[in-house]
Structure formats: C-alpha cells, structure tokens
Image (cartoon, rainbow, N blue to C red):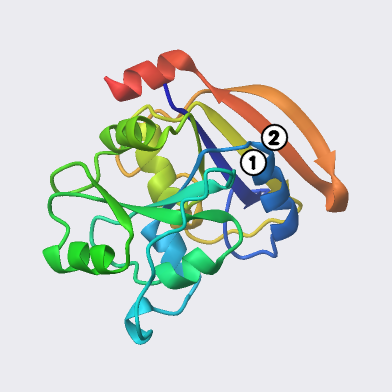
Amino acid sequence: MVHVVVHNAVSADGRVAGFDADVGLHYEIAAGFNADVHLAGSETILAANLDADDALEGGLQPPDDDPHDERALLAVVDSRGRVRSWSALRQAPHWRDRMVALCSHATPSAYLEHLAARHVDRVVAGAQHVDLGEALATLERTYGARRVLVDSGGTLNGALFRAGLVDEVSLLVHPRLVGGPQNASMFRPGQPTDGVALRLTAVEQRAGDIVWLRYDVDPEARRRAGS
C-alpha cells in the first residue's frame, strides 16, 4: 500500500499564502520523508511561473534513468493539460529526470502529444477528472512508489482527503495570522464535510518560532471517506 503524506507550510490560521514561508526548512523536512514520489497539483506548478516548453527549441531529450538516482519522481495532477514547463521542472535539483503527468480520459489529445514529444510519462486514470486512487495504484505498480509526499495546495489536498487516501499530515506552522478567503487554506473540502479527524504524533519547535506538527489520519475516517 502507498503511504501518502500531505506536507504544507502554513500560517497560524492555516493559510498557504500571504506570508513568507521558510522554504529552506520546508524542503529540508520534505527530504527527510525519503519519498519515492512527490505529488503536486497543476495549480501549484503554474503558480511558480516557470518558462513554458513551447518557447524552447528542440524540446526535451529522453530522461536519464540512472538506477542510482535516489531522488523522488515528480508526478503532476493535470487533467486539463495546463502544465507546459517540463523542461524547467527537469532542471530543478529535487527530482529525477523522468517525470509523470497524471491525466484523465478527458485530457485533450493535443496535450498527450505534447507530453510524448517531451518524453514525459503519463498515467491516464478517471473519466473527467483524475481518479487519484487509481493513479496512486499505478504509481505503485509501475514506478515502485511506496511513500508519496504531497506538496500542493488546498484543491489537491482536499481531493485526496475526500477520497480517503491520506495517511499522515505534516505542517510547518509559521507565527503569522494572514486571514483572507477560505480558498487560501491548505484544505478545501469542496463538498460539505464533517472534517478530517487527526491524531497528533509529534510536536517540534524550530527556529523562528515555527512549530512542526505531525498527525496520523484517523483510520476510520479514511475508511468512511474512501467508501
């Protein structure tokens, strides 16, 4: 079974924007999870404002599958086919050279061709939207994923929680109150929900009055959400 960890830097009121997050600490802790796959949503990738591959000449070369490369595989949920910055993503030091787009059967065929031309793997799961459970099962079966670290915003987090797929939550709580709209939260329910029950497993104070909280998701809550 895939173990899924949602890891976010948040303000004291649970927002993921509107404050200066300690990015170095965020990725230091993320690396400590030794995840096989880093899972991100298209909105998170687009927010980084990376250069688009369409503006590059020559496209991408086939990935270098170094068997000794212990970095995580990047998988991006993108049923609408919006991410076109794979060259820039592959230049980042955090991930392996091989990358995966998680698509649905409604993803435009032109985008699937875009991925193929750039040697980006794809997993097609779900009708209109990506079936996250099926996609995770494919990542486990095809790429050997045992531990998946989710570094994304409230939309993808909420979808994973609603599907009962999250095992653990890691929060770096920054000493800042931000306020603002609910959609800036690290968890967007989407549909009416009774919330997600968590069990605190660790508390650690870090520099700058940042507190690292770790929770397990209540197994019964996961079972009910996934049924």
- Residue sitting at 72 percent across and 49 percent down? 28
Label 1 CA crowd tier, 10 Å (few <14, some 14–19, many 20+): many
Image quarter of residue 45: bottom left
Secondary structure found at label 1: strand
Q: Which residue is mark 2?
A: 213
Given residues 55 and 23, the one toward you in this image is: 55
Above or below — where is 57 with respect to 190? below
Given residues 51 and 6, the one toward you in this image is: 51
Above or below — where is 175 with respect to 117? above
Q: Position of residue 58 (x, y in %)?
A: 35, 82
Amino acid type assigned to the residue bearing label 1 in the image: Leu
Q: Position of residue 222 (x, y in %)?
A: 40, 21
Residue 171's mark? Answer: 1
Q: Is residue 76 visible?
A: yes
- Residue sitting at 67 percent across and 52 percent down? 27
Report the side of 17 relative to 177 (left or right). Answer: left
Given residues 68 and 15, the one toward you in this image is: 68
Q: Where, quadrant-wise, is the N terminus in this rendering?
A: top left
In this view, the residue farthest toward the right is: 207
Amino acid type assigned to the residue bearing label 2 in the image: Leu
